[in-house]
Structures are given as C-alpha cells and as structure tokens.
Image: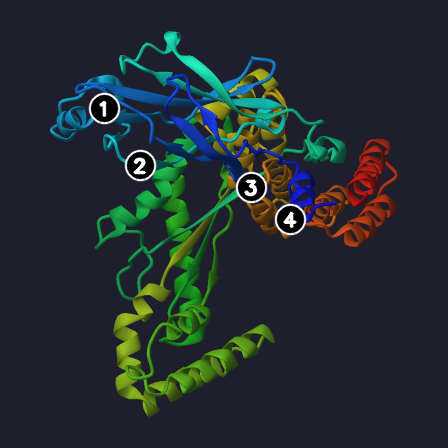
C-alpha cells in the first residue's frame, strides 16, 4: 500500500483529494482552481489552493468574489471559508482608499493585473467539526457582481470525498465515566496579618491588615451568600519568623492564629464547630529556605551556611528536638551579622503569615440544574456533573468536546478528565495533544486502550496490539472488550 495513503487512512482524516492537472474552472469560465488541498490541523480544517487568473478579464469597475464552502454530501451541514475578492485595477484603487461596500470590507482583496499571467495563493481555515470526518464536497461559488447576494451564487464542485466511514469509528474510542461522589472541597490562601511587636491582639486597622483580611472575608462572603454552598470548616495556621526564643514564638504564633480565628468568627453566623482550633508553626524555616533560593550569592555570600542551618533545624524539629533551634539561629546572627540583618529586614516579615483553609461542600444538582449552572457557575460542578452535561450534547460534537475541555480546566489533576479530552483530541486528529494528555490519563483499562488508538494512528501496530492485550487483561467489562475487538479488527484492515 502507498505509504502516504496509508498515513492518511490511518489517521482517519482522508480530507484531501486530487484534481485533474488542468484544475477546476469556476463558473465565470475564466478562473481556474488548482492544487486544492484540505488538511485538518488540530481544531481547524485548512484549505489551500492556487487560483489561476491568466484568462480572467474584468471591466473597468468590476470585481468578482470567490466563495469556498464545505458541504456534507447529505446536504445537512456546511461551513464557509473566507471569501476572496478579485478587483479590477480601478476597483482596487477604490478599495485601497477605503471606498468599498460593507459586504466585503473585511476580507482579502487582490488586484487583477490585466493581460498578464497571475496566480493567487489562497489560504483559509474553519473550525473542524465531526461531520468533516465523513463524506463531503468542497464547492467554489462566485459572486460575479460582488453584490453579496449569496442566494444567486453558481457553485462548481472542486473536491469530493466519498469514502467509507472514518477508521476512527471502527476504533470506537471509549470515554470514561467519573465517580458520582461529590466530595468536599478545600480552598487555601495566605494573609499577611500584622501584629504589634510581642502582642497577639487582632487590630484590623493596623498597617495593611484591612487589605489582608479581605482576602479571607471576601471569599467567605461569597460562600455564605450562595445557597448552593455549605461551609464545613475554617482553619487558621499561623507562622512566626525564626528570631526570638522558639517557645516564645510558639506561644506568639498560636495566640495570633487564634486571635485571627476569633475575629473572623465574629462576622459570621456559622456554627461554632465550623471554626477549628487554630494551629501554628513556631518558626518558619521552610519559608526561609524558599526565600534563600531567590537570593543571589552576591547579596548573601554565606547563603549555603544559612541553608545548612535551616535544614538542620527542620530535621531536629521533625525528630521532636527544639532545644537547639535558638542556638543555631543565634549562631547565624553572631557569625554573619550584616547578612542576618538583611534577612531580618527583607525576608523575615514575609515569614510571619497566616494560612487559611476553608472546607466547603457544593450541593448536588439535578441534570436540569447542572445544565444551568454550567452556563453561569461552572466552578460549582463536580466532574461527574460536567460529564452528565456533556452527554446532553451530540456525542463528540463541538459542544460535547467544549464541555469536556472545561471539565479538564477545573479538574486538571483528574485522570478521567484528561482521558476524555485526549479521546476528543484523537477524534480531531490532534495526535500531539492526545499524546501529552494521555501521560496524565492514569493506568485504567480505558486509558490503555486509548494509548492503543494513538499507537494505531502512528502506525505502531505491534505496540498497539500489546496495549490492547494489556487493556483486555485489566478489565472484563463487555463494552470495553467490544471496543478492543474493533481495534484489533481495524489493525488487521490497516496492515493489509
């Protein structure tokens, strides 16, 4: 079998055809379309062709407009490419001066060089839609008066695809259904609340506290006002910087975190048990290590020594040993005073922070409610609810794929979401994107058989067969085994 034909058939995207060498003459009898090629590129169907104008004669003030349109053979679907306006020289001068009708003001215009050989390269693209995998015809219409009355266009067929169903239909990609369980969610954030030195009373008007407090209260205000949301738990974790005695810092950080908790609680009529007892980390050596990574050695020549001490303290604390922390910290201060002072001024203030965690639940929606929420607050949908909404659309159609894409946007760590978007990419011929997505799709039987599809599309038949065997060993589910059988059948046909 011809390798080029095999590659096209294999991808399930036999979307280009061959025209006779002489090309296709349009309705005016003078314009000839040559080298007409349709190519799917990810989300797009691209059209390219050469329009030979050698025999085109235009009167002084005349223009003609070429309208390419892709039509399904059953006549139910069509998609129009951007038109191309061919002007006489005089008409093109008017166009360049902005004197042009609104109908064709925003499209490409070219000037006919009268009496001279002239070929214009045409390129345009439309959104790829599932029906373009089936039989279709590319038609070239001409608006001979450039008046914009498309109902009067005379169309000439330029390219026809009349082939058996897309091999991807034989491969029968299997989508994955997420769990219907709607778990609680966690929202994390950080506020840099300022306290008077050695004090823990909450002072909302002190320094930038009003702004920092709004990070928490603005979020809670939205949640409490939304009837779809129930706040289950609010937890504050305080951090102190490493200066001062360790046990003193423990007391300070804990009391400050609890003071912030009590202040937040005073604003909301939520059950007492929603507000967890505050916790604290006495000294934020973790934050110091992160900050050290951003400081160049030219600013902090003994950065390695600071890192070594920070790692030692963290290791000691992990073993429950805190008695050495003060001596280690004072040793840094004594040996590298100027560098210590630099950190004290520029880094330590940011180590004193309050992390907050809000645990909440979004109620379950009926399918009708989910379809409405999808349009207004998609962030409230669970992955399962996204999946339900997607299945109200034409399977693997544009809306279906768009919904699956949005689900993956909100659940980027979900292997199920990644798998379903990968399947959509495979159906659209976007092999490179599918390859990336399948690295995030986990090791389920459905993911394994999707990788087999990818291998088939890349002509790695032996690898595909191995993956199909693996998927079959992973699952005894009848629907998946039926898909695997179709995949094997497809490999057999494609290898002939």
Q: Residues within 10 Å of mark 3 (few under 14, many from 20)?
A: some
Q: Residues within 10 Å of mark 1 (few under 14, many from 20)?
A: few
Closer to the camera in the image, 251 or 399: 399
Query: Which quarter of the figure is the C terminus placed in?
Result: top right
Q: What is the CA distance from the residue labelled 2 to the residue labelled 3?
A: 57 Å
- Give SS at disc 4: helix
Q: Which residue is mark 1?
A: 105
The residue depicted at 13 percent of the width and 25 percent of the height is 94
In the visual, does 324 lie left or right of 203?
right
The residue depicted at 25 percent of the width and 46 percent of the height is 210
Query: Compared with residue 210, is residue 66 higher up or lower down, i.e. above or below?
Result: above
Closer to the camera in the image, 206 or 332: 332
Q: What is the CA distance from the residue labelled 2 to the residue labelled 4?
A: 51 Å
- Give SS at disc 2: loop
The residue depicted at 27 percent of the width and 35 percent of the height is 116
The residue depicted at 52 percent of the width and 37 percent of the height is 39
**Residue 326: image location, x then y, percent:** 43, 81
- Give SS at disc 1: loop
The answer to which of marks 2 and 3 sits earlier in the sequence is 2
**Residue 143: image location, x then y, percent:** 33, 15
- The reply to whether residue 65 is visible in this rendering is yes
In the visual, does 181 lie left or right of 496?
left
Q: Which residue is mark 2?
A: 117
Q: Which residue is mark 4?
A: 438
């Amino acid at each position: 079998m011809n390798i080029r034909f095999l590659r096209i058939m294999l991808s399930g995207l036999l979307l280009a055809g061959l025209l006779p060498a002489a090309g296709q003459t349009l309705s005016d009898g003078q314009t000839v379309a040559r080298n007409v090629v349709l190519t799917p590129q990810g989300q797009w169907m691209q059209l390219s062709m050469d329009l030979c104008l050698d025999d085109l004669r235009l009167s002084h003030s005349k223009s003609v407009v070429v309208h390419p349109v892709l039509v399904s053979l059953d006549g139910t679907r069509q998609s129009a490419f951007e038109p191309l306006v061919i002007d006489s020289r005089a008409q093109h001068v008017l166009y360049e001066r902005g004197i042009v009708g609104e109908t064709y003001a925003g499209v490409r215009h070219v000037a006919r060089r009268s009496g001279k050989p002239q070929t214009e390269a045409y390129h345009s693209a439309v959104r790829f839609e599932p029906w373009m995998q089936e039989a279709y015809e590319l038609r070239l219409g001409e608006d001979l008066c450039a008046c914009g009355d498309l109902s009067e266009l005379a169309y000439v067929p330029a390219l026809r695809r009349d082939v058996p169903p897309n091999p991807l239909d034989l491969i029968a990609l299997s989508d994955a259904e997420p769990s219907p369980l709607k778990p609680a969610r966690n929202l994390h954030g950080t506020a840099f609340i300022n306290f008077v030195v050695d004090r823990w009373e909450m002072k909302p008007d002190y320094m930038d506290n009003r702004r920092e407090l709004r990070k928490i209260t603005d979020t809670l205000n939205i949640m409490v006002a939304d009837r779809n949301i129930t706040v289950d738990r609010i937890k504050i974790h305080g951090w102190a910087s490493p200066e001062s005695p360790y046990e003193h810092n423990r007391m300070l950080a804990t009391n400050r975190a609890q003071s912030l908790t009590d202040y937040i609680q005073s604003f909301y009529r939520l059950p007492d048990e929603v507000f967890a007892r505050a916790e604290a980390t006495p000294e934020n050596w973790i934050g110091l290590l992160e900050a050290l990574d951003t400081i160049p050695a030219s600013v902090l020549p003994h950065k390695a020594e600071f890192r070594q001490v920070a790692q030692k303290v963290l290791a000691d604390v992990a073993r429950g040993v805190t008695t050495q922390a003060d001596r280690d910290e004072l040793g840094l201060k004594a040996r590298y005073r100027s560098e210590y002072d630099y950190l004290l001024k520029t880094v330590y203030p940011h180590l004193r922070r309050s992390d907050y965690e809000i645990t909440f639940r979004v109620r379950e929606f009926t399918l009708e409610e989910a379809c409405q929420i999808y349009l207004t607050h998609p962030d409230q949908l669970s992955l399962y609810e996204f999946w339900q909404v997607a299945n109200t659309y034409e399977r693997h159609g544009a809306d279906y794929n768009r919904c699956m894409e949005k689900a993956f946007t909100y659940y980027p760590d979900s292997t199920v979401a990644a798998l379903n978007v990968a399947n959509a990419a495979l159906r659209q011929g976007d092999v490179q994107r599918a390859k990336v997505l399948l690295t995030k799709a986990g090791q389920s039987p459905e993911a394994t058989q999707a990788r087999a599809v990818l291998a088939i599309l890349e002509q790695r038949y032996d690898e595909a067969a191995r993956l199909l065997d693996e998927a079959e060993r992973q699952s005894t589910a009848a629907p998946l085994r039926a898909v695997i059988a179709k995949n094997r059948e497809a490999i057999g046909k494609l290898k002939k």
